[in-house]
Every structure is written in structure tokens, then in C-alpha cells.
Amino acid sequence: MNSRRVTLAILFALACVSCNKSPSPKPQSMSPASTSVASRDYSAPYLTDDKMQKFLQSMSEAQNPFEGMFAQAGKTPGSIPAEVAALDAFARKYGFQGYQDYMAVWGRIAVGEMSIMAEGMKKGLREMTEKSIQSAQEQLKNPSLSPEMRKVYEQQITSGQQSLQNMDKPQKNSLNDSDLALVRKYSPQIEEASRRYNKRPTQGQ
């Protein structure tokens, strides 16, 4: 998923809180106790295969109205009800309970893909650190190594080993394991759909 969609998804997730505090021009048939609250609790499972597949289907549209949700040009307080109605209609078209449901899915996909990306970066950093330690260990085998350089390589090994220990410390994911597993499962399809969407002709072209 490209960085632009990730940024929008994070903004959507944050916006859900304020959306719940503002009067809606058209009440959504959503259960506040189940959908609205659960959609903001990333520690609780929310995604399903059905929701992931519906989201992928929505990306086949030439224009997703959620893309322009935070665009400032041409926006006025009076235009907000119509925009919210358009978002809600788009979400319901693909089987979601409303725009909040759609945003909750999109936000979780974004957070999940950022977690997967972080895992990849961590793996690369581990490999670099291990190579750095091995290189320093090899240098220390040199009998003609000066005391100053020996100290440098010893510190390099100590620092690298400490970094590896920190990497091994358990870290809690921002997204629950169930949702993260679904994002991981559908990540290839999401990336492919994203590439197709970004290649589409934009309005006005």
C-alpha cells in the first residue's frame, strides 16, 4: 500500500472519533456498542475474510471518494453533509455497514501493512548488525592489531550484541494478531489492487 493511502487511512481512523461526536446528516444503521466502538479498538479483532474481499472489490472503482476526504479545496461547512452521504453510499455499495465501517477496515489494513513493513526493516537491520559483529570478530583475530583498534572492534561487538538483545525483546503490535494475520494474508492482493488503482486515469484527464 502506498504511503499516500497509509496516511489517509491513519487520518480516517483518527477522524472516526470526531465523526462520532458530530450529528450525522443520515443516521447509519450501525450498532454503537458493536460497530462504532469496536472499530476504534485495534486490540480487538474486527477484520474478516469477507471485509477484506469487499475492500479489494471497492478498489476496482475508478475513483474512491474516501481519497478526497481531507482535501481542503472547495470544502465548506455546508458541503460536509453531502460528502458524508457520498462516503456512506460508497461504503454500503460494497456491503459495509457505513462509512465508519469502511474506514475502520481501511485503517486496520494500513496499520497492519506498516507493522509488516517494520518487520522487514527489523530483519534487514538484524542482518546488518550480525555482519558487523562478525566483521569485528574477524578483525580481532589479527595479531598485529593496535590496542586502540582492538578497543574499537570490541566496542563494536558489544554495541551490536546489545542491539540484537533489544531487537529480541517482545514488542506489542499496534494491531491485534487476528487482524494482522488477515492483512498479511491479503497483502499481495492489496498491493496489486493498489498498483492498478494508482495507474487509473484521474478525473479531468
Image (tube, helix red, strand yellow):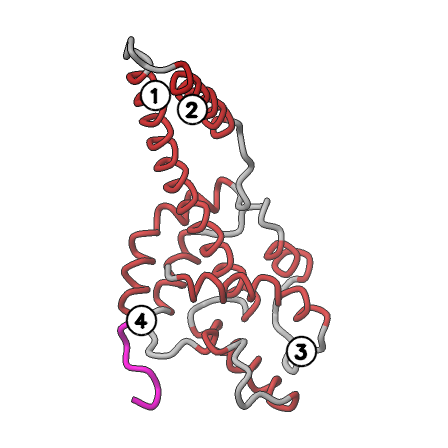
In the rendered image, residue 200 lying in the magenta stretch gets the answer yes
Q: Give the mark nearest the N terminus, 3 or 1.
A: 3
Q: Which mark is residue 51?
A: none
Q: Are marks 1 and 2 in contact (CB under 8 Å)?
A: yes
Magenta segment: 199-205
Residue 33: % across, % down: 68, 57
Residue occupying image coordinates x 43% and y 65%: 5
Q: CA distance from mark 2 to mark 3?
A: 59 Å
Residue occupying image coordinates x 41% and y 37%: 122
Q: Which residue is identified by label 1?
A: 136
Q: Which of the pair 139/103 is nearer the observer?
A: 139
Q: Nearer the viewer, mark 2 or mark 3?
A: 2
Does dot 3 land on a helix, a strand or a loop? loop
Q: Which residue is identified by label 3?
A: 24
Q: Are marks 2 and 3 in contact (CB under 8 Å)?
A: no
Does dot 2 land on a helix, a strand or a loop? helix
